[in-house]
């Protein structure tokens, strides 16, 4: 057997899971889809003493729209991928999900699991920040909401407390006249991307850039926001030159990629710049369509 | 180490065992249910050889625990046919189009393609390549697998 021994619980209700979490704290690792955790356990890189399997908690699997879009943390990624509410109300999320590994992984991997895992190379944390998502964290006796920006705390780390679980992610709608794009580049389909980003572009009534968001994956210890590039676009008339400039600023000033086995830091900067240009052009087209609609 | 009783349906047959929680589903299928058609390649969710259907959906059995299958319905490659002389159309297509050489990866490809072709009766070559992108083959260069999938789509949807 590959994983080291552990104590196993498979509670049927959220309350029972939170009870276990309050008893065992960080000793107990929640098991969501397990598509990152179990490989790490097979290599014994992860050796949790206690595993709390959340898969029997059906109350955490849902996609609802009341005001904003709400996704239960244990919703599997393939369900969100093919969900009409997601496609309509969070098209950026809809566009990003097929980039998560392969269909077999998305059949098991969960939305909340991927977010709470906080892998800098993964797509969903980037989407959460671009869309100003909010996370609902729950413990046995309390619940609180966290802004996506306050949720991620570096490499594989979040600000969840030892007795808390991520139970729901809320995606507010995009502002009016906003276009979006998600793009990434991987060596092979389904691999972790060498670089990628989520882009939003909001136009004002004159068709100038009112606001934007540029959030990158795998070029830092978490999702990286290109604040200087975003500032460079503010009030500007959208053009290929402006998008190119934003890509240069984002890749040279806003990020400090480490480089990895598949791409040097320089190449990651190069890719990020090129993808920024393309993503902004696509977001601009979609923003114009949104204005006409 | 404590054991947990599990009841699993595999290929419409009920199995009951006591398992340690750390037993991987792939090892359970091979060693306790004795269904060795499911192959184990990388054991960390990359190669797709261990793909099975879990409640009808393809998943990688090497990155799931056997205890998690308790009460669920599984299908492995053995479930395609029980008759060696009468292969499932998907298997027949792999045979005819030379969709395998050493055959190690084949069970994973078949279990990935079975639900895919049931839901997508006329996939394009590009769609087939995307559908099988989570399965690695080191022999064929994939072209014959793509051909086999196309042929299988015809066979499976011809009355």
Image (tube, coloured by chain):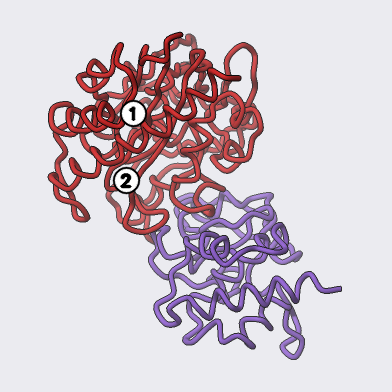
Residue A52 versus residue A169 in the image, above or below: below
Question: Residue B126 versus residue B2: which sits nearer the camera?
Answer: B126
Q: Badge 1 sits on which subunit?
A: A
Q: Residue at x 62, y 40 (%)?
A: A82
Farthest right residue? Answer: B159
Q: Quadrant of the C terminus of chain A?
A: top right
Residue B138 versus residue A197 in the image, above or below: below
Q: Residue at x 48, y 53 (%)?
A: A102
- The CA distance from mark 2 to mark 1 is 12 Å
Instruction: Tell me the element at label 1.
Output: helix
Q: Badge 2 sits on which subunit?
A: A
Quarter assignment of residue A30: top left
Question: Residue B116 versus residue A18: which sits nearer the camera?
Answer: B116
Q: Give coordinates of residue A174: x percent, y percent.
A: 50, 17
Q: Give coordinates of residue A254: x percent, y percent.
A: 17, 26
Instruction: Tell me the element at label 2.
Output: loop
Q: Residue at x 50, y 22 (%)?
A: A169
Q: Give coordinates of residue B83: x percent, y percent.
A: 76, 85
State the hue of chain A: red
| Label 2 or label 1, whichever comes before in sequence order | 1
**Where is mark 2, residue-wise?**
A47
**Where is mark 1, residue-wise?**
A26
Quarter assignment of residue B45: bottom left
């Amino acid at each position: 057997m590959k994983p080291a021994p552990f104590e196993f619980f498979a509670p049927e209700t959220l309350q029972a899971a939170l009870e276990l979490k309050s008893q065992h704290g960080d000793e107990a690792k929640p098991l969501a889809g397990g598509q990152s955790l179990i490989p790490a356990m097979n290599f014994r890189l992860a050796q949790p003493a206690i595993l709390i399997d959340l898969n029997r908690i059906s109350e955490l699997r849902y996609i609802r729209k009341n005001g904003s879009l709400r996704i239960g943390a244990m919703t599997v990624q393939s369900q969100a991928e093919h969900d009409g509410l997601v496609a309509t109300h969070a098209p950026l999320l809809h566009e990003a999900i097929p980039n998560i590994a392969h269909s077999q992984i998305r059949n098991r991997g969960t939305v909340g699991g991927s977010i709470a895992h906080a892998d800098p190379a993964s797509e969903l944390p980037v989407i959460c920040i671009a869309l100003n998502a909010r996370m609902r964290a729950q413990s046995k006796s309390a619940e609180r909401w966290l802004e996506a920006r306050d949720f991620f705390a570096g490499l594989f780390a979040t600000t969840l407390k030892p007795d808390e679980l991520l139970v729901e992610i809320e995606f507010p709608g995009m502002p009016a006249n906003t276009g979006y794009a998600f793009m990434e580049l991987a060596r092979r389909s389904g691999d972790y991307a060498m670089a990628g980003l989520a882009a939003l572009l909001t136009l004002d009534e004159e068709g100038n850039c009112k606001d934007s968001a540029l959030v990158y994956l795998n070029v830092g210890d978490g999702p990286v926001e290109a604040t200087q590039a975003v500032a460079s676009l503010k009030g500007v008339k959208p053009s290929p030159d402006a998008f190119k400039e934003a890509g240069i600023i984002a890749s040279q000033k806003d990020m400090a990629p480490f480089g990895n086995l598949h791409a040097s830091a320089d190449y990651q900067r190069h890719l990020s710049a090129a993808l920024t240009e393309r993503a902004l052009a696509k977001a601009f087209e979609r923003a114009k369509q949104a204005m006409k609609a | 180490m404590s054991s947990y009783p599990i009841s699993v349906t595999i290929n419409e047959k009920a199995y009951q065992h006591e398992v340690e929680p750390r037993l991987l589903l792939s090892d359970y299928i091979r060693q306790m249910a004795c269904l060795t058609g499911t192959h184990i390649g990388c054991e960390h969710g990359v190669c797709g050889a261990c793909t099975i259907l879990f409640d009808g959906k393809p998943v990688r059995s090497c990155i799931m625990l056997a205890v998690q299958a308790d009460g669920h319905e599984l299908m492995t490659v053995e479930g395609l046919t029980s008759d060696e002389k009468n292969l499932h159309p998907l298997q027949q297509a792999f045979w005819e189009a030379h969709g395998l050489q050493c055959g190690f990866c084949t069970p994973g490809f078949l279990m990935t393609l079975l639900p895919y072709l049931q839901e997508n009766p006329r996939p394009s070559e590009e769609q087939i390549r995307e559908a099988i992108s989570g399965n690695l083959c080191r022999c064929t260069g994939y072209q014959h697998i793509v051909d086999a999938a196309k042929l299988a789509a015809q066979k499976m949807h011809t009355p």
